[in-house]
Image: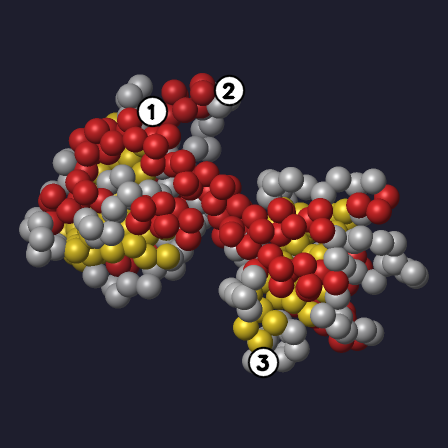
Amino acid sequence: MALVVIRPAPAPGPDPLTPALGTDSGPEVRPCDPWSGDPVPTGLGGIEGLVLAGDTPQALPLLRAALAAEVPVLALGGGAELLARAADADRTPADADPLLGGAGFRVGGSAWGLPAPPEGEGAGGLLGRFAALVAGRAEHTATRAFFTPRAEAWEERFAYQTPAYEAAVARMRLLPGQTALDLGCGSGRAMPALRSLVGETGTVLGVDLTPAMLTAAAQVGREGPGRLLLADCVRLPLASGAVHGIFAAGLLDHLPRPRTALAEWARVCAPGGELLLFHPSGRAERAARHGRPLSPDDPLAEPNLRPALESTGWHLTQYEDAPTHFLTHAHHP
C-alpha cells in the first residue's frame, strides 16, 4: 500500500512533496510522473491515498474511483480543478476543516482541494497532516478500495450461497422481539433469515464499512428486512448489551485485530446472547482455492479461535470446519 503522488510536470527545484509526506510511521510515498512516461494507475489496488499535484486529465478515472471508495485525496493547484470536475457540485467550503485550516474545499469526508497550495512551513504542515490521515485510515481504505468496485455485482455473483446462509442463521436461537446484527453484511444476504427469527417486533441491523455495499443491499430490497448501518465493526455505534445475536460471515479472519473485534461484539451483546461465525466453505477448501496451505496462525483454527473467544467474553459451544462450510457458535454468559 502506498500514497501515490501524481505530478503532471517536473518540479522547478527540489521535490517539495515527497520529503514532507514521507515519515517513519507514515505510508510509503510513490511518485507517479506522467510527464516522464509513468502510467497513471487504472485501479485502486495498492493505493491508500492520492495526491494530485496539478491538473492531470488522464487521472480523472482514478480520481472518480477514489471518491467512490472514499480513498483520501489531496488535490493541489490544478489538481483541485480536476477534483472539482470529478465531484461536480458536491463541494463544501473547508471553513473549519482541520486539514486545510479554512482554505479550499472538501468533497465528502475523504477529499480536499486547495487551488492555491501553501508554501514553506505551511505546506509541510498540510502535507504532514494529510500523510497522518492516510496512515490512520489505511485499514478502512483497503477494505473500501477492494469492495467498492465489486459491490454492484456482489449479490448476483454470490446469490447461489443464499440457502447456505439461511441454513446457518436457522441454527441461531433468536426469539421474536429480539435484536439481530449482521456484521460485514455486504449485500445483506443473511438479513431476511434473521428477520424470520426475530419477527416483525424484532430489529435487524446490517452493518458494513463500505457505502457501496450498503447501496447494493438497498437496491436488492434488504432495507425491508432491516436497517442498514455504515459503521466499523470494531467501533460499533451501539449501546452495551443492545443486541441478542450476532451473525458474521467471512469477516473475523480478515480483521487485523480479531480479539479487539470479538471484545467489541461481546460489549454490544446482551447476557445470554450468541455469536455465529460462518463461511459457506471450509477452511481447507478456501486455502486450496487460493493456492496456499492451511496456516497454523489462521485465527479461525480452533486452537486459536477458542482462546480468543474465551478471553473476550464468549464461550465456544460449537465448532465445525467441514468441506462445505465453516461454522462456530459462541454464547455470551
Checking the image for residue 95, the label placed there is 3
Distance CA(mark 1)–CA(mark 3): 52 Å
Locate residue 45, reporting x and y percent.
Answer: 60, 40
Where disc 3 sits, the SS reads loop
Distance CA(mark 3)–CA(mark 2): 51 Å
Quarter location, residue 106:
bottom right
Residue occupying image coordinates x 41% and y 40%: 152
Q: Which residue is mark 2?
A: 291
- Disc 1 residue type (three-letter): Gly
Residue furthest toward the right?
13
Query: Compared to 199, does 91 lie above or below?
Result: below
Residue occupying image coordinates x 72% and y 43%: 40
Is 238 in front, or is 55? 55
Q: Residues within 10 Å of mark 1 (few under 14, many from 20)?
A: some
Q: Earlier in the sequence, mark 1 or mark 3?
A: 3
Q: Earlier in the sequence, mark 2 or mark 1?
A: 1
Contact between marks 2 and 1 (CB within 8 A): the answer is no
Q: Residues within 10 Å of mark 2 (few under 14, many from 20)?
A: few
Q: Which residue is mark 1?
A: 282
Task: Please tell me whether mark 3 or mark 2 is closer to you in this view.
Answer: 3
Query: Compared to 41, does 332 lie above or below?
Result: below
Residue occupying image coordinates x 80% and y 47%: 33
Residue occupying image coordinates x 29% and y 54%: 228
Is 267 in front, or is 101? 101
Task: Please tell me whether mark 1 or mark 3 is closer to you in this view.
Answer: 3
Q: Quadrant where the N terminus lies?
A: top right
Locate residue 264, reporting x and y percent.
Answer: 33, 56
